[in-house]
Image: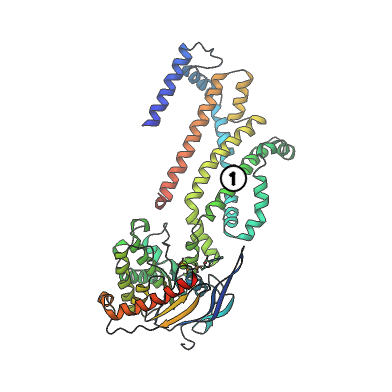
Amino acid sequence: MLPLAVTAVILIGWALLSQYGKIPAMFLPSPTGVWHAFQALMADNYAADIRASITRVAIGFVAATICSIPVGLLMGSFGTVESMLAPVVGTLRYVPITALVPLLILWLGIDEAPKLAIIVLSTFFYNTIMIADAVRSVPRDFINVSYTLGATRLQVLRRVILPAAMPQIVDALRVNVAVAWNFLFIAELIAADSGLGYRLMMAQRTNASDQMFVALIIVAVIGFALDQAFRLAKKVLLPWSA
Amino acid sequence: MVGVGGLVFRDVSKTYETPGGPLTVLQDINVAVAPNEFVCMVGASGCGKSTLLQCAAGLNRPSAGTITLDGEPVVGPSADRGMIFQSYTLFPWLTIEENVGFGLSLDGVSAAERRETIDRYLGVVGLTKFAKAYPRTLSGGMQQRVAIARGLANQPRVLLMDEPFGALDAQTRIVMQDFLLEIWRTTHISILFVTHDVEEAVYLGERVYVLRSNPGRVREELRPDFPGTRDHHLKRTTAFHSVVDDILDLLREEASAAM
Ligand SMILES: Nc1ncnc2c1ncn2[C@@H]1O[C@H](COP(=O)(O)OP(=O)(O)OP(=O)(O)O)[C@@H](O)[C@H]1O
Ligand SMILES: [Mg+2]
């Protein structure tokens, strides 16, 4: 209820400001102007760009997650793996992924590959570090008691550490999907011929602030929906963690 | 000293490497738990009780000496030696019955057989009607009862208990002590029970080892012999209190010597 009220207040404020605020429409379009821009964009196959962006994030994020779960689990569980990987992951963590963009374009061209690579890299590092942390916070006695119940190392990993860390892992994924979404824009603003970022850049060339607003609102809505989806998934799949 | 049967510690020592140099927490421990025996160990906080149990469980390695179970050396953890911890260790993502069946599910016991064992031990601990509940909906005392059922369901040869009632309030603790005695009488399992509560040790143990600290060593071995079966009336008898007081005196000597 409250979020709806806040949204309404913002919309009304925005409408009033654009109507009476004496701000040129070039800087602040009116809500109806944005709505018309949205309709015009949809007529111009905007849906394909939305799809392109979502697909990129989905593929990149899923691929990164599939890789980061086992690596994070091993890093958090075993000292040797940790000491092997920590310097690498720990150092790369401080390299802004954006700084890799020119290199990625050089190596991978300007097609889909570099965009996916940016998303995969950014998500992979943050996921791995956060999953390893989640694993390290599993109570030591959970692990000890499993061994005394006859579990092997692999069983402890799969049947105790993984489920025990799961709520924190889902939270990490929820945070990092927003990160992936951020990096998608960086990728698309720099080199793309489709996607929301690409359309945003096109809008900038013609100073079409109404179109920029359309892109921003869509991004916000999708980001919000993703966040809610992860919260819901956690509630449904891990009801015990509430 | 008992023969080769049961759980036997021979000259067990444990030294931890710490930043401040080596720290010997256990020295020349010679202790045994015969089959079907209920043995308690009592000692001050930090005297190495948990370390000793972890060594028996195979979760920790002695620096010297050997530990054997029915003549076989202990080299690592196994379902032979169940352990109950002071902290609540039920897996929150599993229901009570899944927790109790956890050990059995690890080595592919058939579902039907598992069902039967789970039902039996849930019955033993009196929590049948909570079978489908999740641990967080149970009180601390109930959770420890489930943890004991989970340990028993594996049918270990010895149950190692590390202050299992330490986190419980006084009343629940008393109920749990009687409950554990009852379980021991019906299942005939060997128990090595560690506590710093002297009354608890004397009430529960057929034999009691008193430990001294820094480094942990066996100070005294007692066999409190009370007539009749143990129940809460025992705690009001002078015989009981004189044993408790003797042990308290030993521990007090220890503590003042350490000051
Ligand atoms: N991994 C370790 N490294 C270094 N020192 C340790 C380690 N584990 C335990 N110790 C030390 O060994 C001593 C004995 O610890 P332990 O936990 O076995 O005692 P305890 O009798 O179980 O104590 P409590 O009654 O508090 O549970 C303590 O001084 C503790 O600080
Ligand atoms: Mg302890």
Task: Give the residue type that dot 1 points to.
Answer: Tyr
Q: Residue furthest right?
A: A106
> Going by the image, does B249 lie left or right of B21?
left
Q: Residue at x 63, y 33 (%)?
A: A186
**Residue drawn at (53%, 27%) of the image:** A216
Query: Callout 1 environment at 10 Å: few (<14), some (14 to 19), or many (20+)?
Result: many
- Front residue of A73/B229: it is B229
| Residue occupying image coordinates x 48% and y 15% | A18
Is residue A241 positioned above or below B127 on the image? Answer: above
Q: Quadrant for residue B200, please give it.
A: bottom left
Task: Name the residue nearer the viewer: B94 or A135.
Answer: A135
Chain bearing mark 1: A
Q: Is residue B107 visible?
A: no
Q: Is residue A194 visible?
A: yes
Q: Which residue is mark 1?
A: A126
Mark 1 within 8 Å of ligand 1, using the beta carbon = no
Residue B63 appears at what percent x and percent y?
Answer: 59, 75
Q: Position of residue A205 (x, y in %)?
A: 64, 20
Relative to B68, does residue B170 appear above or below in the rendering?
Answer: above
Left-right relation of B176 to B28: left
Residue B100: image location, x then y, percent: 39, 66
A89 on left or right of A228: right
Q: Residue A52: x, y in percent? A: 58, 34
- Secondary structure of residue under mark 1: helix
Q: In the displayed image of the protein, which residue is found farthest to the bottom?
A: B3
In front of the other: B161 or A101 = B161
